[in-house]
Image (cartoon, rainbow, N blue to C red):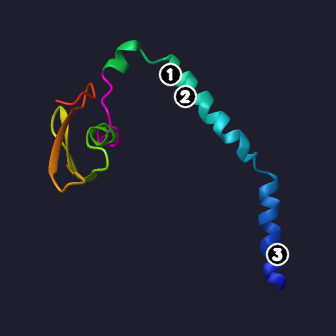
Amino acid sequence: MKRMTLIISALMLSLIGTPSLASAPQWIQTDRVSEASTVSPYDYAQRQISAREARAIALARVPGGEVVDIRRTADAYRVRIIARDGRVVDIVVDANTGRVR
């Protein structure tokens, strides 16, 4: 019991000296702002969509479908979806623009 009390006391003392967790997002946001100010406008043109974004775009085309597979080629994502009626639908999403081909 004394050992448990010592461990809890040590943990409490270590927490007193640490900075508030509420300020952590503020530090992250500050770093992002300073980083964003050094990014050139041309860097945004090179941005490609993620697999998660491609999935959302494809599901918007087949509402109620279930994504079975996502594959990335050089410049596109192929998202395979099973529709509600059982059809298998392949949606090809451009990785640069996000447009459906």
Q: Three-letter amino acid code at disc 1?
A: Ala
On screen, residue 92 versus residue 34, left or right, reads: left
Task: Please tell me whether mark 2 or mark 3 is closer to you in this view.
Answer: 2
- Circle 3 residue: 6
Q: Give the crowd class for mark 1: few <14, some 14-19, many >=20 residues within 10 Å.
A: few
Q: Depth check: 33 or 11 in front?
A: 33
Can you give x and y, in whole percent of width and height, for residue 41 in the image?
40, 13
On screen, residue 1 versus residue 91, left or right, reads: right
Quadrant placement of the C terminus: top left
Residue drawn 83% across the image and 69% down it? 9
Can you give x and y, in whole percent of width and height, for residue 47 in the image?
33, 26
* Residue 65 image label: none
Whether pointer 1 and pointer 3 mark residues with C-beta atoms closer than 8 Å, the reply is no
- Circle 1 residue: 36
Can you give x and y, in whole percent of width and height, for residue 60 in the image?
31, 38
Q: Three-letter amino acid code at disc 2?
A: Arg
Q: Depth check: 74 or 27 in front?
A: 74
Specify the quadrant of the image occupied by residue 32: top right
Report, in whole angstroms, how far the alpha carbon at label 2 lies from the one at label 3.
40 Å
Q: Give the crowd class for mark 2: few <14, some 14-19, many >=20 residues within 10 Å.
A: few
Report, in whole angstroms, how far the alpha carbon at label 1 lies from the one at label 2.
6 Å
Q: Three-letter amino acid code at disc 3?
A: Leu
State the residue lying farthest toward the bottom: 1
* Chain-order first, disc 1 or disc 3: 3
SS for tag 1? helix
Residue drawn 65% across the image and 34% down it? 27
Whether pointer 1 and pointer 2 mark residues with C-beta atoms closer than 8 Å, the reply is yes
* Residue 32 image label: 2
Tell me where the magenta segment starts and ends, as one range. Answer: 46-55
State the residue lying farthest toward the top: 41
State the residue lying farthest toward the front: 85
Residue drawn 28% across the image and 50% down it? 65
